[in-house]
Image (cartoon, rainbow, N blue to C red):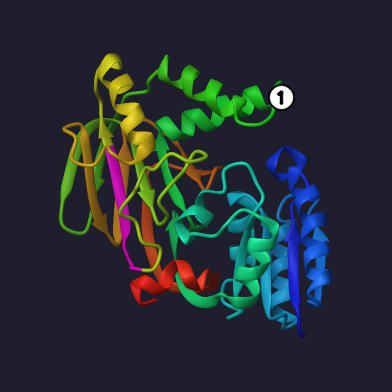
Amino acid sequence: MAGYYFVVNPVAGAGKCSELFTQTMSVLDSRGVAYSYGYTGGTDDAVHMAHDAALDGYDAVVAVGGDGTAQDVARGVYGTGAPMMVFPFGTGNDFARALRIPTGCDECVEVLLSGFSRNVDIGRANGNLFLNVSGFGFDTDVLKNTEEYKKRYTGMKPYLLGIVKTMLHLNRMQLTVEADDRVLECESLLIAVANGTHFGGGMNVSPASDPFDGYFDVCLIRSISFPLFISLLPQFVKGKHIGKKPVEYFKTKRLAVSSSVEYELNLDGELKSVTPALFEIEESAIPMIIPAQAWESEGA
């Protein structure tokens, strides 16, 4: 079927996604673009809508929302060969950062129409698909604490309060990490298995990640004192933490992690599965429409 199908999460971005998509439709109409769309309303709606649209033969299926919506659409189009794109109208939009997708309505439409398709890697955590980052520890605790504050506040305030609460109650984890070429036993505050570069609404956890290179970038922060963690956090947010003494950073295609107690896994901002965890990369798994200009310097 000619045209594009948009899977829209109307509550993403604290409800701003719906407004932004209305503006997007005006842009599409002004350019004579053929499209259809549907709004999600419940669990796995985006997965089913994306899968049906892929089988219907649309030129591409577009995830309109945040990282959770992008992951659901990826789950829907996986295995169909249908291209997808992300319109980052959610709160975090971290995977879109790794893909260098702009945030404006006009700019997103331009990428959709003039960008190119490149097969992106995906990750699996205990078999569960993720596009961006999975792991546990500090980020998972921030996610849980943020959800508490979302009941009272909107915008970025819940994330900031979630970070503060998590810092005041640092969880120190006993881990055994087995990668392609190493075994590491340590006490850790965080382990992030990254396909993308950012998580948590803009923290540059994995600045060297490339979602097309066939590898995870793993960032592990060893247990450190509270004052030292406070001093490290701004560098962590900016991606300047690589090479610092408490940070282990390496590439791998497969990672097995066991822990002394059970921890929930964060997959693209959603809590799914628990430790022990097996992380596996699947290379070139899904055609993804990305900005041509942003990637042409790298010979993509």
Q: Please give the residue where the numbered disc 1 appears in the rendered image.
A: 151
Q: Quadrant of the N terminus?
A: bottom right
Residue 161 locus on image (x, y percent): 55, 20
The residue located at (26%, 58%) in the rendering is 252
Compared with 118, 151 (above or below) is above
Magenta-span inclusion, residue 218: yes
The residue located at (37%, 23%) in the rendering is 171
Compared with 147, 164 (above or below) is above
What is the span of residues highlighted in magenta in the rendered image? 213-220
Compared with 242, 287 (above or below) is below
**Main structural element of the magenta stretch: helix, strand or loop?**
strand
Left or right: 298 as drawn, with respect to 294? left
Residue 44 can be seen in this image: yes
The residue located at (68%, 67%) in the rendering is 109
Q: Quadrant of the C terminus?
A: bottom left
The residue located at (48%, 61%) in the rendering is 99
Helix, strand or loop under label 1: loop
